[in-house]
Image (cartoon, helix red, strand yellow):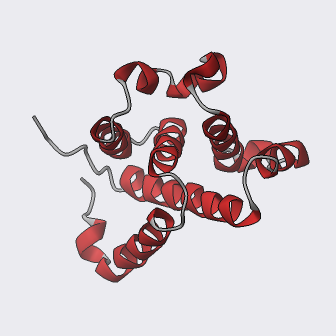
Amino acid sequence: MRLDYTKASPGGVKAFGNVYGYIMQSGLDAVLVELVYLRVSQINGCAYCLDMHTRDLVKKGVSVGKLALVQVWHEAGARFSEREQAALAWAESVTRVSDTHVPDDAFHAAAAVFSEKELADLTMAISLMNAFNRLAISFRRPPEVQE
């Protein structure tokens, strides 16, 4: 690890934790949020977050078969609900903002499934995970060793 950002900036990590706490009590389904966190972490290539969110989803009862298909959710048919598909599509567009510029059709597709509050909260969750990914990747935080 290059540096332990949790020790170097505990106030910053606490602020991110407060946003995480808000998201988890926002009313969005916890599994949907974790699926989005996993997809964002896949796109960004964050080993620490991939490990953590995979484990969290398994603890929440998500099957290994479904987890294996998160990166190809658009080809997985009914394995993902309409809300999950919309959230994953939105997460991809927002995470790849430099390429997508989050086009109107992506917004309208997400807005057709989520309320304004849900979409704002979902976008905050996506943004938060992108920030966590950037911290973990920048400072080379390895996955925690677990049996």
Residue extending farthest to the left is 147
Q: Is residue 45 above or below residue 65?
A: below
| Res. 145 image quadrant | top left
- Looking at the image, residue 73 sits to the left or right of residue 56; the answer is right
Q: Position of residue 51 (x, y in %)?
A: 31, 39
Q: Which residue is drawn at the image coordinates 37% and 46% (left, top)?
A: 49
Residue extending farthest to the right is 104
- Looking at the image, residue 45 sits to the left or right of residue 72; the answer is left
Q: Position of residue 111 (x, y in %)?
A: 80, 52
Q: Position of residue 135 (x, y in %)?
A: 41, 59
Q: Which residue is drawn at the image coordinates 61% and 20% (left, top)?
A: 78
Q: Nearer the viewer, residue 28 or 7?
A: 28
| Res. 55 image quadrant | top left
Q: Nearer the viewer, residue 78 or 95?
A: 78
- Looking at the image, residue 139 sits to the left or right of residue 105; the answer is left
Quarter holding the C terminus is top left
Residue extending farthest to the bottom is 11
Q: Position of residue 25 (x, y in %)?
A: 46, 68
- Looking at the image, residue 43 sits to the left or right of residue 17; the answer is right
